[in-house]
Image (cartoon, rainbow, N blue to C red):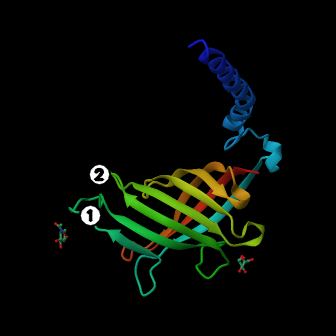
Amino acid sequence: MARLLPHRLSQLTLYSLLLCLLLPNSLARKNGGFARTLSPKDLGLNNQKLSKFRLYWHDIVSGRNPTSVRVVTPPMNTSTSFGLVRMFDDPLTEGPELSSKLIGRAQGFYASASQEEYGLLMAMNFAIMEGKYNGSTITVFGRNTVFSKVREMPVIGGTGLFRFARGYVRARTHFIDLKTRNAIVLYTCYVLHY
Ligand SMILES: *[C@@H]1O[C@H](CO)[C@@H](O)[C@H](O)[C@H]1NC(C)=O
Ligand SMILES: *[C@@H]1O[C@H](CO)[C@@H](O)[C@H](O)[C@H]1NC(C)=O
C-alpha cells in the first residue's frame, strides 16, 4: 500500500496535467469545430435590396403538351376537388402571351387543401433564367384561393442572388379557360434579398 501510494499520486498528477493541457483544446474544438459565428459582412451581406418582378405564369393542363399534370386523384368527389395534387413545370414569361420572352420556369406542385372553397396549397420554385438572375431561384409557399381577385403568398427563401430572400407575391388571374382549365396568372413579386 505504502509503496503504491506515491505511484498512484504521480499517476494522478500526470492525468490532471494531461487534462489541463487537453481541456482548453477540446473546449475550443467543441465551440469551433462545426459551428462558428460569422458577421454578415463575412458573406458580403451588406446592402439589403427590395426587388419587384412581374411574371406571367402559364398553367397548361390540357392539349398535347401540358405543363401541369395530375399526380394524385382525389379519393372522393367533392366540389373543391379536395385531395387533388398536380405537378407543374410552368413557363414564366415577361408578357401575358406564351410567345413573349421566357424569364424562367415555375416548378412545383399545388394541392387542393380546402373542403369549403377552392383553395390550393402552392409549393414552387421560380427558376429564373434571364440576365444576371439566371440560375437563381425564389421559393414560394402559401395558400392560393384561386377564385379570389388577388391572392398573397409568402416568399420563404431563395438561392443565388436570392439567398436569404423573404417577401411575398401577389397573384392575379389574367385569363382562365373554364373549359380547358388552362390559366395565365400575373405574379407580382416583392423580394428582400442581398
Ligand atoms: C366522380 O364523379 C364522376 C362523374 O361526375 C364519376 O365518373 C366518378 O366515377 C366519380 N368518382 C367517384 C370516386 O365517386
Ligand atoms: C443561363 O445559364 C445557362 C447555364 O449556365 C446557359 O446555358 C444559358 O444560356 C443562360 N441563359 C441566358 C438567357 O443567359
Q: Which residue is mark 2?
A: 115
| Residue 193, position as x, y percentages in the image | 72, 51
Q: 79 left or right of 172?
A: left
Q: Which residue is mark 1?
A: 74
Q: Residues within 10 Å of mark 1 (few under 14, many from 20)?
A: some
Q: Quadrant of ligand 1?
A: bottom left
| Residue 59, position as x, y percentages in the image | 48, 72
Circle 2: residue type: Gln
The quadrant holding residue 125 is: bottom right
Q: How many marks?
A: 2
For the point 40% across and 74% down, which residue is it?
69
Which residue ends up furthest to the bottom in the rendered image?
64
Establish whether ligand 1 lies closer than 8 Å to the Cβ of label 1.
Answer: yes
| Rendered position, 12 above or below 105 | above
Q: Secondary structure at mark 2?
A: loop
Mark 2 and mark 1 lie on one chain; the one further toward the N terminus is 1
Whether residue 96 is visible here, answered yes or no, is yes
Circle 1: residue type: Pro
Q: Secondary structure at mark 1?
A: loop
For the point 65% across and 21% down, which residue is it?
7
Question: In front: 30, or 122?
Answer: 30
Question: In front: 39, or 68?
Answer: 39
For the point 30% across and 49% down, which residue is it?
116
